[in-house]
Amino acid sequence: MTFLDQPLKRAIAVSTLAALSFLVSCSDNKVSQCNKLIKVANEAVSAVQNVTQTATPDNVAAMSEIAEAADKAKSDMQGLSIGDEELKSFQTRFISMYTDTSKATRDLVTAANSKDAVAAQKAFDALKTATDQESPLVTQVNTYCTTN
């Protein structure tokens, strides 16, 4: 082996290692982005559960806390840097769901404070529509994130 063979072998080894690192980072990138998205969604669920575990159904302050939790989740979700197109779609859907949840919850608070049963029912229906999106969305995210 000549002196020039060693640098060439090192260059090939470094190039191969760089290519493998790139491939691993691509797959880690999806995993990392999935983890970020799922973390925000899980934090939103935890925040709402913390409120609902101690609140009574007629607790207007608790409803306001739920709206605030939805606003925070929306903001946190908007702050994520997502490059994967499918995950961006999920991110957009989460943002929309959190926006709708916050609005409907605030409308419910307003209706409760003004004792407007018709507005309360409308707000409740909108809240149900918004939150019914969560389970299928989470299932789709989990399916996408667990496949290669």
Image (tube, helix red, strand yellow):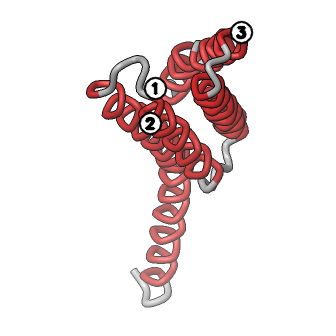
Q: Could you say whether the residue bearing mark 2 is in a helix, strand or loop?
A: helix
Which quarter of the figure has residue 98?
Answer: top right
Which quarter of the figure has residue 44?
Answer: top left
Marks 3 & 2, CB-CB < 8 Å contact: no
The crowding category of the residue bearing disc 2, from other C-alpha atoms within 10 Å (few below 14, some 14 to 19, many at least 20), is few
Q: Which mark is residue 88?
A: none
Residue furthest to the left in view is 54
Residue 75 drawn at (x, y percent): 60, 51
Marks 1 & 3, CB-CB < 8 Å contact: no
Give amino acid for label 3: Val
Q: Which mark is residue 61?
A: 2
Give the residue pinned by disc 3.
Answer: 118
Camera-near label (1 vs 2) is: 2
Give amino acid for label 1: Thr
Residue furthest to the bottom in view is 3
Residue 136 drawn at (x, y percent): 57, 13
Give amino acid for label 2: Ala
Give the residue pinned by disc 1.
Answer: 146
